[in-house]
Image (tube, rainbow, N blue to C red):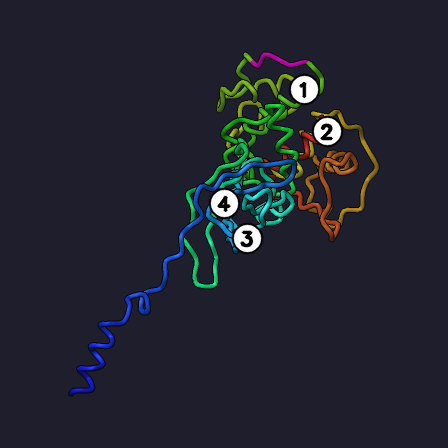
Amino acid sequence: MKKIFILIIILIAMPISVFASKEVAMPLNVSAVKESEVYNFEIKNAKDKDIIEIEVKSEGNDVKSKITKNVFVKNNKKYISLAQRELDSLVGPSTGYTFRLRFAKNDGKSNFTDELHLGKAPIFRNYSNWAYNDLLKAEELKLFSKEVAKNTREKITREEFAEIAVKAYEIKYKRSAQGSVKQFKDTDNRYVNMAYDLGIMKGKNREKFAPRDHITREDYAIVISNLFKLEKSKDLKIKDAKKISNYARDYVNNAINGGYLNLDEKNNFDPKREITREEVISSIVRHI
């Protein structure tokens, strides 16, 4: 009993810090600036060679990733640096990013800082990395609507495609159509009317356009051939050629030979696959 009593006294007398892990202060007064292709973060309360964990998020794709960096001293100021190529590797290309920083010391990690926003978030969202530069160009040309920009990986509708095709036609040929005459019973969309007037797109039949339907690769080839006035080209060896509708075969050859569409590694075209918004935009913007 005496031994137990003595042990209790010793435990009470010991510092609370023995039982509680020491709280690590978070980075304070963090400022950031982009210089050329490098993002520099100044951290006022850091020390040379401190380890900093950076959480970065693309503001175009909402993709998150983390990386650790060592603090270095320059002109008596403490920095970490992150190159653009590292960001591209972590979360893909973007014009805007969100950062959070925290110390990652041997004795524990601190809380993250509040978010730091650098750059400008692109108008388009949820895109594939391969399509980024084409989407940037298309954004400058005002080629797509805000609705399309919300999710460029989504399958494109016939109505959405009509708008992009008409705008591309206007840019390439410097001419247009009013689209004031209603051509189909199931839509009043002026871009649909314009696409019809310009000979770019047709309806499912004389009265129906089916504006909400998606577009297959073979039907896309037809519109591309009309839009860019592609001439008949040599027949290609396509492994799944039997799957291509008879009415679309010449157009598919034209589109592939013109570099608007391609075959996969097994030489298949996959004619019935529905095409996405970013695939359409990339294919068109490279040729206007």
Q: CA distance from mark 4 to mark 2?
A: 46 Å
Q: Which labelled disc corresponds to residue 171?
A: 1
Label 2 is placed on what type of residue? Answer: His
Residue drawn where x is 59% and y is 29% of the image: 161
Query: In the rendered structure, which segment of residues is drawn in magenta?
Result: 175-179
Depicted 257 relative to depicted 189: above or below:
below
Q: Residue at x 55, y 46 (%)?
A: 79
Residue 48 image label: 3
Question: On the rendered image, what quadrant is the N terminus found in?
Answer: bottom left
Nearest to N terminus: mark 1 or mark 4? 4
Which mark sits nearer the N-terminus, 2 or 3?
A: 3
Question: Residue at point 48% right, 57% down?
Answer: 104
Q: Main secondary structure of the magenta part?
A: loop
Q: Position of residue 54 (x, y in %)?
A: 51, 50
Q: Which label was assigned to residue 43? A: 4
Q: Nearer the viewer, mark 1 or mark 4?
A: 4
Is residue 249 found left or right of 15 in the rendered image? Answer: right
Mark 1 or mark 3: which is in front? 3
Is the residue under label 2 in contact with that under label 4 (CB below 8 Å)?
no
The residue type indicated by label 4 comes to: Ile
C-alpha gap between disc 4 and disc 3: 11 Å
